[in-house]
Image (tube, coloured by chain):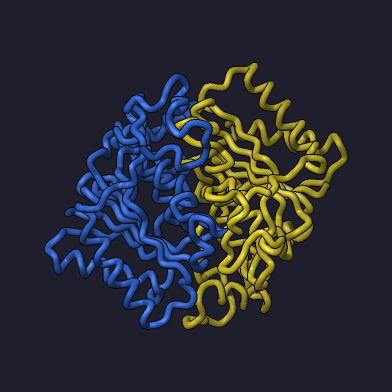
Chain colours: A blue, B yellow
């Protein structure tokens, strides 16, 4: 594998930092290539704005149009271009972060906002949700949560991680063609014992090394015939139902 | 009403800017008080880190513990304290942003990450999901999406906005006790005609002025008896089902 591991936690001695080291060590030991984007260490600029485009100002262009112009014209800011190069190189994307307010921390969201530019990650009409320039890649979300199981689970008050992470798994990874794998979730992260950590580390090592063999979440393809006019799910599929799971084949 | 309007769009001439002006004008004309946090204009620091706590370093404290110490000790960074004061003053919170990757832009996520500190927005055991220090307030999400209806809808490929926004509506607002209202969503935002804009502006004015009379999304209370051991929904409620909607009364 060629793995781009995007990591977002501010503390060097955190559970997340220790898990990241385990995951990267597992990759190294098995002979896989990897590159790390440690967003806090990089002091990654989280906020997408017009400064990201170093060409002449285009005040009349929408942000997405301006980003596409900058991408095609080679005038994206250098920090974004460096991440695009890593993503173009990688066949596997790992996004690791603590779950803050049931979503990625701002710095990780800002990596997506700024790096997934139009023309690179999206913007080819009709080539979304399973298709597009990033297709062929696999994406693994690794996250820790203060919430404990089973409250964090299918019938728990916090929700099922796959539903909580639907905007990231379906609306971001799958949207751009990246096959989203079942996420790795470490619950109860504020109260991890040494034994808990050993189990989480071993579990993460297994999950990371089995990325090529793991069945992705079976989201439906936009172009697979399951959606009819207006991109609405056909009446005969998951009839009468709504919710994130109707988009599973 | 006393409305804190948190706004996150980088462009002064955007659809969002025009809608914000409509919403604030409607409030003013009706005699309501409002304060605006224009995050881009404020150059809001999006990234939560240890610099947010101006007291002595506490490297052994978790981030959440350090934030709570800083809150109780009065050593939170001044930009966060200013937002806490606004939120304490307000009875209504409006969060307005363009939907980027089916989630708020990083700068808005960073407002939540940094302002919803432990001890203020959460952290009292057993007082979550409908209860807590922020209870009694109402929250309205106002967002624009490039995606069009009905693809953005209950059976559409992009999903139902209430499911997409579940981490914000349920996991953030309701978690801290803020009653989340049905969100205002402006779809097809890249192709808004003058007539579309007039309709969206009129709709937003109505929704903003009717905040006190709007029925909140009927999420279940943590302490309402609907959740059993481990905070799992009782078997007799929404039997056999999973997904965000099982948490509706």
Q: Is residue A8 visible?
A: no
* Image quarter (top left, top right, bottom left or bottom right) of the N terminus of chain A: bottom left
Residue A222 in the image, given as x and y percentages of width and height: 36, 29
Image point (45%, 19%), residue name: A229
Residue B197 in the image, given as x and y percentages of width and height: 64, 23
Q: Is residue A83 left or right of residue A143?
A: left
* Image quarter (top left, top right, bottom left or bottom right) of the C terminus of chain A: top left
Q: Is residue A241 left or right of residue B221?
A: left
**B163 over A187 or under it: above or below:** above
The answer to which quarter of the image holds residue A7 is: bottom left
The answer to which quarter of the image holds residue A206 is: bottom left
Front residue of B110 and B179? B179
Residue A221 in the image, given as x and y percentages of width and height: 34, 32
Q: Residue furthest right?
A: B31
Q: Residue furthest left?
A: A31
Q: Is residue A66 visible?
A: yes
**A111 over A231 or under it: above or below:** below
Image point (42%, 72%), residue name: A11
Image point (59%, 18%), residue name: B193
Image point (19%, 64%), residue name: A27
Q: How many marks?
A: 0
Front residue of B245 and A31? B245
Residue B84 in the image, given as x and y percentages of width and height: 69, 62
Front residue of A161 and A128? A161
Q: Is residue B216 left or right of residue B230?
A: right
**A173 over B63 or under it: above or below:** above
């Amino acid at each position: 594998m060629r793995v781009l591991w995007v990591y977002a936690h501010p503390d060097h001695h955190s559970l997340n930092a220790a898990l990241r080291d385990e995951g990267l060590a597992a990759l190294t030991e098995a002979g896989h290539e990897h590159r790390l984007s440690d967003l806090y260490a990089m002091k990654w600029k989280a906020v997408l704005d017009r400064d990201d485009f170093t060409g002449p100002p285009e005040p009349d262009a929408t942000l997405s149009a301006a980003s596409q112009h900058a991408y095609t014209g080679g005038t994206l800011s250098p920090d974004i271009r460096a991440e695009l190069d890593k993503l173009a190189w990688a066949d596997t994307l790992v996004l690791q972060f603590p779950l803050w307010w049931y979503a990625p921390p701002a710095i990780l969201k800002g990596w997506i906002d700024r790096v997934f530019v139009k023309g690179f990650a999206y913007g080819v009409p009709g080539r979304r949700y399973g298709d597009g320039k990033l297709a062929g890649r696999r994406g693994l979300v690794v996250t820790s949560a203060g919430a404990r199981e089973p409250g964090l689970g299918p019938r728990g008050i916090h929700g099922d991680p796959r539903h909580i992470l639907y905007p990231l798994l379906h609306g971001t990874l799958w949207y751009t063609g990246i096959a989203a794998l079942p996420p790795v979730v470490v619950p109860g992260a504020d109260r991890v014992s040494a034994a808990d950590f050993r189990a989480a580390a071993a579990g993460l090592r297994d999950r990371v090394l089995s990325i090529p063999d793991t069945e992705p979440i079976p989201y439906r393809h936009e172009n697979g015939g399951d959606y009819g006019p207006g991109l609405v799910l056909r009446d005969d599929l998951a009839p009468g139902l709504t919710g994130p799971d109707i988009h599973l084949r």
